[in-house]
Image (cartoon, helix red, strand yellow):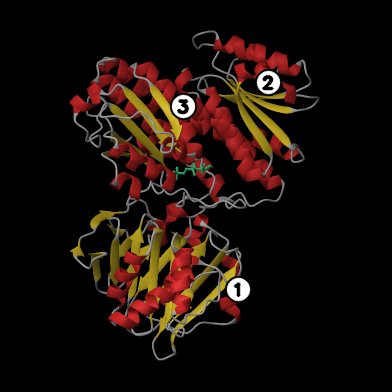
Amino acid sequence: MCGIVGYAGPSEASGRPLDVALDGLRRLEYRGYDSAGVALVTPGQGGVASAKKSGKLANLVEEIAAHPLPDATASIGHTRWATHGGPSDANAHPHLADDGRLAVIHNGIVENFATLRAELAADGATFLSETDTEVTAQLLAREYRAAGDLTAAMAATARRLTGTFTLLAVHADAPGTVVGARHDSPLVVGIGEGENFLGSDVAAFVAHTSEALELAQDQVVTITATSVDVTDFDGTPAEGKRFTVTWDAAAAEKGGFGSFMDKEIHDQPQAVADTLLGRSDAQGRLVLDEVRIEESVLRAVDKIIVVACGTAAYAGHVAKYAIEHWCRVPVEVELAHEFRYRDPIVDERTLVVAISQSGETMDTLMAVRHAREQGAKVLSIVNTHGSSIPRESDAVLYTHAGPEIAVASTKAFLSQITAAYLLGLYLAQLRGNKFPDEVGVLLDELRDMPRKVRTVIERGEYVRATARSMAESDKVLFLGRHVGYPVAMEGALKLKELAYIHAEGFAAGELKHGPIALIDSGQPVFVVVPSPHGRDQLHSKVVSNIQEIRARGARTLVIAEDGDDEVRAYADEIFWVPRAPSLMQPLLAVVPLQIFAMALAGAKGLDVDQPRNLAKSVTVE
Ligand code: F6R
């Protein structure tokens, strides 16, 4: 939530600080798009120049084109997801203080802002906005007047704030310097040659450098063109952790597709393949070096709790079926924001698995902390390096999906399922529930999935055409059973968030217990049909469910496996997916649902990459 970028360059003023800030904001816009703004340190031109505009980044770019900004030596930039104060020009960041010589941007929520505002107002400060950020700017200005040093002032400010924050500031007195601080909100450093960067995530600067520094909680960082200094909030020098970004800037571009979402759907075979890559030895046996939790602890685990939100939680639901089946250990899936507040039963024998694309979701981060406080080991499945959740976990299994820019998650879902399956197989092998050769067979099935996912994507045109013909729909239902149930919920979520259509996912067996009352003539219902070759007669049960809704007038849109002739008679539309073992089917069945939601939103003229009210990486609770 909120994208933040900072840049410190050579002492010779130039247009680069503005270019870097705008390019960084373009790459971070998925984090929030209620407003955008920049501040530049402009030695010899009055100290600090700024521009800000409500709405998307394009509005700011237009504003700057109409009123050009001077050359500069440092910059900060912000793209906002509104919390305190609506999305207006006045509430947009940066916020200025110290007679316009200090500029501040902020991600997070300052919880004690009302007290601080009253204190500062009593001291003579005046405020132009309703934001908590302006309060931090005024506080920083006061601390700066006292300390005469921006880094010390930032540390003093950070010590006064409660809540969550990443702050960046520039001051006219420190022309080539950007100072930042973080508490429960993301900030990473990009290390360039003769220039340095700050960003909410590496996407902000990966076009300029792939060398990065991870900051720990409660640290202040000061960058100039040639230095990066880190301290704790009490001023004690500290070290960041160096890492190299493994994807290049092109991975964060649309690559010829009309939208990031379309590109990311097409990235999915690669995302699954890359997540599997390097995780087996020369004999093809599963090796997960990253699982740095003692084997004796993992053998003793008597319960697994998956904590996650949204799409990541649905990936967890899918994984539950597989892990319980393979490992014979109970798996609960809990929305991270519910977990922490319900006094969950967690102890040293519980393994908590946190799933998160961004690695920054505050609800999930808080659940991780709570679990560890209760003595549980936490293993996280995360896509973004340098993020908070892996740092606070006992072990991390990275998905290798590459940057996911579209706000609605697609390739992260597939790679999360893949990583969770690897974990399940690893535990099954370790705990003796499966022999290595059995694990090998399942791994081979997984390795075959990228090819099959590609086939589903290649069949996408029929899904798109169907979606275009349904642009007027106002309610769509989704049914699934077993692993098809979370897929149905994920399909409904995609449609809600992209096309703003009321959509609901149900367990097919639950329908007759109430929701079937929703069905009337012409009601579109997607049904994820299990493999006819699977166990437990699930297929025939779902076919019966289709007949029940059809008898009540539903229009059935069926996801079925190639060759499933039985279902053909009951489907108004069929989206075929290749044959796969039951537990692998979610990796295929979800793809037509993603394509459908994207195409229907497109047919309604909506922005599929940046749906209204949403932001990627939800860093507030
Ligand atoms: C939906 C979506 C969200 C995220 C959720 C968790 O398309 O993207 O539901 O899945 O906010 O985000 P991460 O995975 O970053 O923790």
Q: Residue sitting at 41 percent across and 21 percent down?
A: 322
Q: Is residue 321 left or right of residue 607?
A: left
Distance from Cα at disc 1 to Cα at disc 3: 45 Å
Which of the 4 image quarters holds residue 473? top right
Which of the 4 image quarters holds residue 336? top left
Please say if the residues under marks 1 and 3 sit with CB atoms less than 8 Å apart. Answer: no
Q: Earlier in the sequence, mark 2 or mark 1?
A: 1
Disc 1 packing (10 Å; few <14; some 14–19; many ≥20) = few
**Is label 3 or label 2 in front?**
2
**Is label 2 or label 1 in front?**
2
**Badge number at residue 318:** 3
**Badge number at residue 514:** 2
Query: As displayed, is residue 472 above or below residue 234?
Result: above
Residue 384: percent from the left, percent from the top? 37, 48
Q: Regarding mark 3 in the picture, which secondary structure is present there?
A: helix
Between 302 and 157, the one lying in front of the other is: 157
Type of amino acid at the residue the image marks with label 2: Gly
Residue 119: percent from the left, percent from the top? 44, 73
Q: Earlier in the sequence, mark 3 or mark 2?
A: 3
Q: Regarding mark 2 in the picture, which secondary structure is present there?
A: loop
Q: Earlier in the sequence, mark 1 or mark 3?
A: 1
Disc 3 packing (10 Å; few <14; some 14–19; many ≥20) = many
Q: Residue sitting at 53 percent across and 57 percent down?
A: 32
Q: Is residue 213 left or right of residue 357?
A: left
Q: Residue sitting at 36 percent across and 51 percent down?
A: 247
Query: As displayed, is residue 263 above or below residue 253?
Result: above
Residue 60 is at least partly visible in this image:
yes
Question: On the image, numbered disc 1 is attached to which residue?
Answer: 62
Q: Regarding mark 1 in the picture, which secondary structure is present there?
A: helix
Please say if the residues under marks 2 and 1 sit with CB atoms less than 8 Å apart. Answer: no
Q: Is residue 561 left or right of residue 554?
A: left
